[in-house]
Structure formats: structure tokens, C-alpha cells
Amino acid sequence: MKHSNPLLNPKNTHRLQAIPFPDFSLEQFMPAIDASLLEAKAEIETMKNNPAAPTFENTILELDMNGELLDYVATIYFNLLSAESDAEFKALAQLISPKLAEFGSMVATDPLIFARVKAVYDAEVAGKAKPIIPADLNDKEAIKKAERYRLIERTYTSFIRGGAMLNDSDKKRLTEISMESSQLSPKFSDNVLNATNKWELHLTNSKDVEGIPENSLKAAAFTAKKKGKEEGWLFSLQPSSITPVLTYCKNRDIRRQAQKAYSSRAFKDEFDNQELIIQTLKLRKERAALLGYKTHADYVLSDRMAESFATAKEFLEKIYTVAYPAAMKEVEEIRQFAKETDGIEELMPWDMSYYSNKLKEQRYAYDPEELRPWFKVEDVVEGLFVVTGKIYGIKVKQVFDVPVYHPDVTTWEVWDKHDNYLGLMYMDLFPRDTKRGGAWKTSFQGQGMHRDGLRRPMVSIVASLTPSTDDQPSLLTLNEARTIFHEFGHALHSLLADGYYKGLSGTSVLWDFVELPSQIMENWLMEEEALNLFAKHYQTGEALPKELLDKVIAAKNFQSGITNITQLRYALMDFAWHTTDPDAIKDVDAFENEVTERFRLLPPVDGTNISCAFSHIFAGGYSAGYYSYKWAEALEADAWSLFLEKGIFNQEVAEAFKNYILARGNAFHPMELFVAFRGRKPDPDALLKRDGLI
């Protein structure tokens, strides 16, 4: 029966079952959440009270498929919360999040459900040999058997980690912690977005914008006009707007204003996140203690590829010992260059990008802005699909009959080389006030078994790249083009998924493995053989000159020490937050300064703070997990070396990467999958070698 609330009608007449976004309105979401939550609870009650003996089908698979309608509604809400939401829409998160957290905790701590899960675990996994990756990946029965084992194992583990073994009072407190925590993350994210949106820099004197590239000035003038300014240029804290200011603006005071504004978002202002940080840390610490772990980091790392906090920290510290001396040398070069060039006596954070870029220009006769005409966004997207078509044989076709949630969004069908449908993809690439900053890949539907059978995924790539203006197309920097390649790597992890159970499918892997597919995808953007397929001047059609490409490649390891130390600062600060007793942290800023002192390359600036806008760890999925970027980068450097050895479009290597990494999801432990692809365990020095540090 068709429901009057369109959110409660996941089935529709669209040929791809695409989500009918234009049919939804704000007032429909809470009733839809409540109704679908009741349905999910009813399904759980039926399952746990089933008089039949527990089996994989009536317990494990039932849990994997539980609450499909709730997943549908909640997934739409939370994706729109990040990509297209006003204050009223955002406010619903404070009502929706605790309801979902309470339900999730209720299931995880229910003794009858856990008894059923344990019965299946004892019958099929405990004491049984773990399936190995079959020699023939076309042996679907062997794959399905392995996935069955893995799903039982992962489900059992999730119940243990979710509090199934606790006493009743501890279970009650764990549920309260989940509900409280679920409200803090959206608040943190909202504060960062509000602080980002509030700051604007309106300049009308041409001397103040001297040095900023013409493309960026056109965009800033266009923004000023859109915001009702009669003249001048309007800059914001969106990366596509502020980065050219920090990199090219000759006016040092303008750079100072921009850098301080960006580095003080949600810190000591009306959107201050300091108290939310402490509250979040206390709840995470308490949850870890209830579950038998010393710290939140210990809790998180016990279920990662690294397996322990000690292993992950040792990995980062090894990079630090090599990268820090290199970074200090690189900063000294910039300091001397700034002094010789402009008489700068003390190099400050707002000088770093400016003089670093000037030094790169001098050393390599190359400015990254030169590349923009060859990276028109439509050409980059088309080129991405040409490149991945050559790697994996996939075909991507733009379609115009799929409903979208904003006019900026484009839609694409993805097919394999045998004309099998792989999935639907949305692309939402430009900034707006209703979208949080940054770039990410998300899903509206996962691949795998649903109640009506196997479904293909619906994925989305969201970013905030340089937009077009009324007289200029969107021309990207190399880093922005890299962002599209990166996020499409995540999308491929879902689109090429070839599993049975959605709980193991696509990006549902251990978190420190999830960045491997995305980071390896970036490499093709720096290869002449790939760039020649699509990099054409947007006006003349001229191919990217080899001379310019050679300069780009020559400069690829420029200041790699600084790059590594910047990432290590984030990763080890994340660990510091999540291994320190929150009660011992009396001042958020003082604590940050203390733990980041060993990474400091430039003088500190009063009134700035990284943590208050560190959404990855306080509003995303990376708490005690930011190290994953470096961990996966090390895996990627080693994996990419095989492509370089055999050829970047070598079909044998590409097929192996697709079949062992992209298609398998979490069917096997990530180390087993990596070894199956590479033929050995990862080379721990691959990253440092690739970055030219050893």
C-alpha cells in the first residue's frame, strides 16, 4: 500500500529506483523516522522471539537486513544534513540522532539477541578453520562460504564491542552515552559550518588583491555581485576561495586576516566548540572503560588493521624521525627565501603558502595556477572516467532522468565491460552555504543482499571545488582534480563491490584500510600516459605541454617533509586527545599547544586552534583513527609500485587490484587481501621511499 509520506515509499516506478528527492519536505522526516523505527523494532522482536533454533539465515542475515526502511529514511536525512540543509533541517538531528543511537544500543545489548548470535557463532565459527581466499575467485560458492563465516564473526564481535556482555546497569549507561554522543557530533559540525559561513572578506582596493590569479579574482567578483556588493571582491573560508589568497596575495596583512580567520573557526566565538570537545572526550573515555579498555584509542585500535594503539603510534613515530629533520630544513629554506625576497624577519603561518609557492616557482619555473586551463571540471570528470575505463573496463554515462536534491548535482550510471549495471552515482562538486566544507564519498544504498534480493549501490561524491562564474567555467587546481580522483576511488570501492552481504560490502572494511582505494586512484593524475587521455586546454584544445608536465612531476616531492609532518601533527594530536584522561585537560588550547609543540615549524599564533574545527575526529568517523590516512598511504605506495613496475594500465595488475581489493570489501581480513594482491606483506619503507625521504 502506498503511504502518504513519500519517505515511507522506498519502492517507486523509476527505472533505477532512484530516490525522489523533490517529493520530500522538512515536516515529513520526523514522522518517517518514527514510523520506520517502529517497523525496525517490530522486525527485531519477531527475530529474537523466533521459536526456531538460531541459524545464519534467521539471525545473522536477519540482523544484516534489519530496518531497511529506517536505513532508507535515515540515510537520506544524514546525507542531506551534510550536503543540503538549512538551520531548521539541521535542528532535526538533535531529535533523530538519539533515537537511532538508542535503538542501536538496544539491539546490541539485548541478551536474547546476543544469545542467538552466540549460538550461531559457536556452531559455525568458534574453533572452526577460517576460510582462505580461493585460488579461483570465480568460485562463487567458496566466496559465499567465506563471507558467511566473516559476517558471523564480525556480527559477534560487534555485539561484544557494543556491550552485550555488560551487566544491566552498565548497559543502561552505555545506551545513555550513545544517545548523548549522537547529539554532540552534529552540533560540532554545525558550529564549524556556521563559523565558516559567517566570515567574509570584502575588498575594494586593487592593491589589496595584487598577486591573486585572475581566475580567482573573477570568482571573488562574481561572489561579491551575488551577495549584493556593488563592487570589489568577496572572499570566504571555503578552500577554493581562501587558498588563492594565502598562496598568492602580496598584501601580508590580508593573508594574516585570512589565515587567522580560518585557523580560529569555532574557537572563542559564538560557535565555540571547546566544551563540546571535552564532553565528547569524557563520553568516549567512559564508554571505553565500561567495555574494558584503558582509553578510547585502545578501544578503537583493537578492531583495526593495525590491531593496537602501540602499533599505530610506532608506525607514525618512525615517519616522524625521518620527516621532521627534512621539514625543518625545508622551513629554513623558506625562511631564508622570504628574508632575501621581501625582508621578512619572522616567518609566520600566513607567510608559509605564499613563500613556499614563490620558492617552488623559482626552483622549478612552475606555478600550479598554470595548470588550471587544462583542468576544466567537465574535462577532469570525463577524463577520470576515460582513465578508469582503461584501468577496469568500466563505462560511465551521464543520465538526466534521475531526481536530484540540488541543481548542482549531476547523475551517472556505471556499467562494467560486459554491460552489467554496477550502480548509480551522484556528483555534487561545488560549495554553498547549505553544505559542509571538505570532500567525501557517501552512499544512499549499499551493494548486497536486501529483502528483495541483491541490489547495486547508489553512491555520491560531494566536494567544494572552484565554481564557475557568469563568464568563466570551473577551472580546477591540480589538488582539486586530485580530490575528484580520490573520492572516485572510494566510489569504485562500492561500485565494483561483488559480495553477498551488505554488512561486508564496499567500504565496510576496517577503517585503516578504507583509504587505500581512494589514495591509489590519485596516482594516475600524475602520469603522462593518463593525462594525455584528457588534459586539453579548455579554449584551444591544446594537450598539456610535456614541458609543463615534467615540471609538475619534478616538483611532486617538493617539501614532502612538511607535508608529512602536517599529517603526523593531526594524527598524533588525535591520539593525544584519545589517550589522555579528559578530567586532566583543563584548557583545550593549552593541551593542543602542548601536544603539538614537537611538530611546530612556525611560531604559534594567539587565538587560533586546530581542534575546534577538527571535524574528522569530533564529528566524523576518524576518532583515534586519523592515522589511517598515513597507514593507507603506506599501503598505497607499495601497491602503486606494482603498477609502476608492470605498467599503469596493465590489465593483470588492474584485475588483481579490482578482484582482491575493490570487489571483496570486508569478506577477508585486509592483510590477507593485500598479500593476495601484492604477493607479500606491505613494505614498511614504501611511503618514505616514494616521498623521497629515504
Image: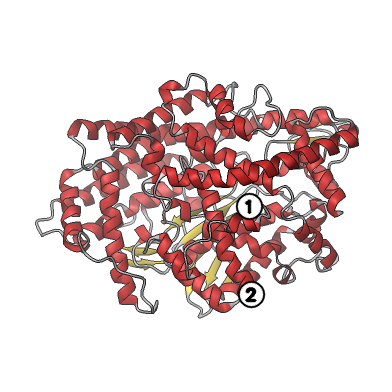
**With respect to residue 568, does 645 lie above or below?**
below
Residue 531, x across and y down, in percent: 73, 67
Q: Which mark is residue 429?
A: 1
Residue at 43% across / 36% down in the picture? 93
| Residue at 42% across, 66% down | 664
Q: Amino acid at mark 2?
A: Gly
Mark 2, secondary structure of its residue: loop
Structural crowding at the residue carrying mark 2, measured as other residues with C-alpha within 10 Å and reported as few (<14), some (14–19) or many (≥20): some
Quadrant occupied by the N terminus: bottom left
- Residue 36: horizontal and vertical position, in percent? 31, 47
The answer to whether 302 is drawn above or below residue 120 in the figure is above
Q: Quadrant of residue 153?
A: bottom left
Q: Are marks 1 and 2 in contact (CB under 8 Å)?
A: no
Rounded to the nearest whole Å, what is the CA distance between mark 1 and mark 2?
31 Å
Looking at numbered disc 1 in the image, what kind of residue is underneath it? Answer: Leu
Dot 1 lies on which element? Answer: loop
- Residue most extreme to the top: 586
- The residue sitting at 59% across, 38% down in the picture is 569
Which label sits on residue 647? 2
Residue lying at the far left in this picture: please name it.
51
Q: Give coordinates of residue 250: x percent, y percent.
A: 86, 36
